[in-house]
Amino acid sequence: MMTTEISPDGQLAALVADAQRLYEDLAFGSVRAWKDGAQGRRAIGFLPIYAPREIIHACGALPVGIMGGSDRLEIVRGDSYFQSYICHLPRSVVELAVSGRLDALDGFLFPSTCDVIRNLSGMFKVLFPDKYIHYLDLPQNFVAGQGGRFYRSELQSIARAVGALTGIEATPERLRHSIRAYNDNRRVLQQLWQLRCDAPSQVSTAEYYLLLRAGYVVPVEEHTRMVERYLSLVGSVERRAVDNIRVLVRGAFCEQPPLALLRTLERAGCYVVDDDFVQGIRLIPEPIDESGDPFDALAHAFLHRSLPCAVKYDAKRTKAADLVDACKRAQADGVILMAPSFCDPALLDQPMLQKALEEAGIPFTTFKYSEDTGQFQVIREQAGTFADAIKLWGATI
Amino acid sequence: MSTAAIKDASMEQQKALMAGYFDALATAPERGQKCVYTFVPGNLTELIRSFDLLPVLPEINALQSGMRGKSADYIGLAERGGHSEDVCTYVKCDIGMLKSGNIGPTGKPLPKPDLLLLSYTGCFTFLKWFELLREEYDCPIMMLHIPYQGDGEITPEMRDYVVRQIKDELIPQLERISGVKYDEDRLRQALALSSKAEDDLVWTLESAKHVPSPIDAYFGGVYYIGPIFTAFRGTQDAVDYYRLLRSEVQGRIDQKLGPVTPDGVLEKERYRLVVEGPPNWTSFREFWKMFSCEGAVVVASTYTKVGGLYDRGFRHDPDHPLESLADYCMGCYTNLNFPRRIELLESYINEYQADGFLINSVKSCNSFSAGQLMILRELERRTGRAGGFIESDLVDPRYFSAANIKNRLESYFQMIEAKRLGV
């Protein structure tokens, strides 16, 4: 009897298909399955962009990123909560919530990303008075004795509340263990980013993106194994490189572009070699200290090691230099500033980013999208024209 | 309705105060007086003035530009410069004004800032606004992060955070800029004056509990909050203004007079309303007249609480100066969470015997607007009163559709009538 060995290509396709299933499952079936795996398990949802998942993990709960409904969710009731000039993300989040798709989640963290997510925290308090709902006020003052001290108290407050739900205290030992688990995850994600940057033809934007999204629903240890396996498999297959330009994407840190939009960029001639998709997963890209006081370590990492982002106050006024440096590091030919419609942080940041790029002579193009954008022809033409112009005239456009 | 133009003495006094303030700003550079740009919610006027510095409030400049018909050009200029049509029009109006020579609302130039004090209270846009202004000015900037009342309360950790920032960063910064040493006694004296003025402001706002109401607490209210929300809190001028205002309102109560409107004194109060959200500034009088012509009086509003919820008991406290300033910053209306905003509105509807409530949802202000449709539903459910919803903008005239708003208001007033008839 002959046995059929699955080729690396096939294994890779299966892994990506698994990631895509996770991405498409708007009812969080994997989270429900994880909870069913043992009695008393709890899952805590968090909104974009950043939440300290280590704290939730240390309490024995599963942190789950809620990134909206993309283009796969019909909004039935969500629109009745928001005016036309509010971005799309909160509509789909409310739709997910009132339709019962978020029922597996035992609590929610709403980070201080913008006024919309802030207000959504209070709306959830009204909608779900029996659930743990907390507005996570990330510090905008980056002095250790001020913002750091305050943030430490925020972290402790979350640890107490989630610990009360799970019955597991986030002891220093447990927290250090969790930090280690997420550091392992950071290391493999760094490898993924590096490979994508070095050989973007090997790591497609869509695959890369699906891997990131998987990290928001499965346990971190499982996600680390998943990325390791992807890296191993993708290294053993050969994919054809095409004559695409290398672009850096900024503005997509909160409401996420639909997958088809990412594929459109690539088809239009743009390899994405750096981006801010799902930014919370790598807001702190380097490993966090595993030896000292874990609350201090987490606070220090946020204050001093987190990446620049539109929702963080640019205290040291390095926004322009950071963007230009990122372009140089990634050897980007140009930048796509793609922001969700009505996204205050991204759109208010954009004039400053444009100025920085103009001064540095780096070509850029801008467009808006929403998570349910369904027509890509205009974006394809715009991105394609951008790519063609760079190929023809380089940085002089 | 009487058509006689009425100018109360308090209005004249406020006009003189504001003119003097903008004169002082215009002449500040030549007089060597330094200026601090900061925001209305959670402003630290007493502290700033205790260093002989003048506060400049970009939102006030923007709304004044809106009222004087200049905002459309300013916004257009900013949008042509790369600012999105989707974002706050206060910011774009301010940027456009700056690019047009920074001529203030009274036609006189505004001074450049010596400090951008980013008092980050209840509005994400503030953060970006001053990052944008920083690109234009060669001056220091300081972030004063005010935590949000996410769980509906001010915790000791939140207070400690704000006090530390004021004590360890802001005060030394103000000392450096002004060359004046921090004088806590001077600050205490100012806070004592604030508290006096706040007493009379609250008395004035609460006079709307009378039937008929002697004031309009939204359209008239924005004038009443002017001095205390801006540059005059902590001054004798503010104390005098609010004492005079109080005596005038008492006079109207004694005579059972309604509020002063653009067409004179309102003679018959037909509808008592509570309003949530800021007003439109570009068509302010036209907007007001849509109410006053129907005999609708706003008896309480949340916009008049963006600079502090004095009517819920807060007073600046000279005995605890920095803690009191911290609590003030954290207690502004847009720093309250949703459940507390809904509770506040519900209490206004009941306490002020309102026939209904109306939400003016402004496109520019997500801090106010995001989720207001839930507020509408919750209030209808809790109070059984008629709820109305209209949309406009702060200072972008493209988003003020007079016919549409008037239509909606007329329907809304019919809804109140129907409720009265038990339909």
Image (cartoon, grey):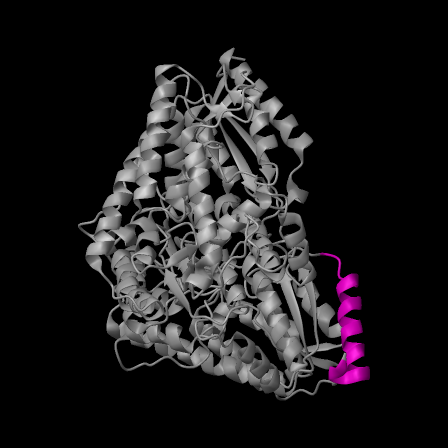
Q: Is residue A381 magenta?
A: yes
Q: Is residue A92 magenta?
A: no
Residue that appears at 37% across and 35% down: B343
Instruction: Please determine whether, in this image, residue A386 is positioned above or below residue B156.
Output: below
Does residue B301 appear in the picture of this structure?
no
Out of A144 and A169, give the one closest to the viewer: A144
Give the residue at x 59% y 81%.
Answer: A324
Q: From this viewpoint, is residue B183 visible?
A: yes
Residue at x-position 75% and y-position 64%: A379
Task: Kindly indicate the quadrant of the structure image that contains residue B351.
Answer: top left
- x, y percent for residue A174: 28, 72
In-front residue for pair B254/B382: B254
Q: Which residues are magenta?
A: A374-396
Q: What type of secondary structure mainly makes up the magenta span?
A: helix
Image point 49% across, 66% down: which residue? A216
Say whether residue B311 is left or right of residue B218.
Answer: left
Point out the residue furthest to the front here: B30
Residue A386 drawn at (x, y percent)? 76, 74
Quadrant housing residue B11 = top left
Quadrant assignment, res A243? bottom right
- B9 left or right, relative to A59: right
Compared across the picture, whether B64 is left or right of A72 comes to left
On the image, the x and y values in percent for residue A2 come to: 67, 84
Tell me the quarter of the image containing the N terminus of chain B.
Answer: top right
Tag count in the figure? 0
- The image quadrant where one finds the C terminus of chain B is top right
Name above or below for residue B305 compared with residue A89: above
Q: Is residue A325 above or below residue B408?
A: below
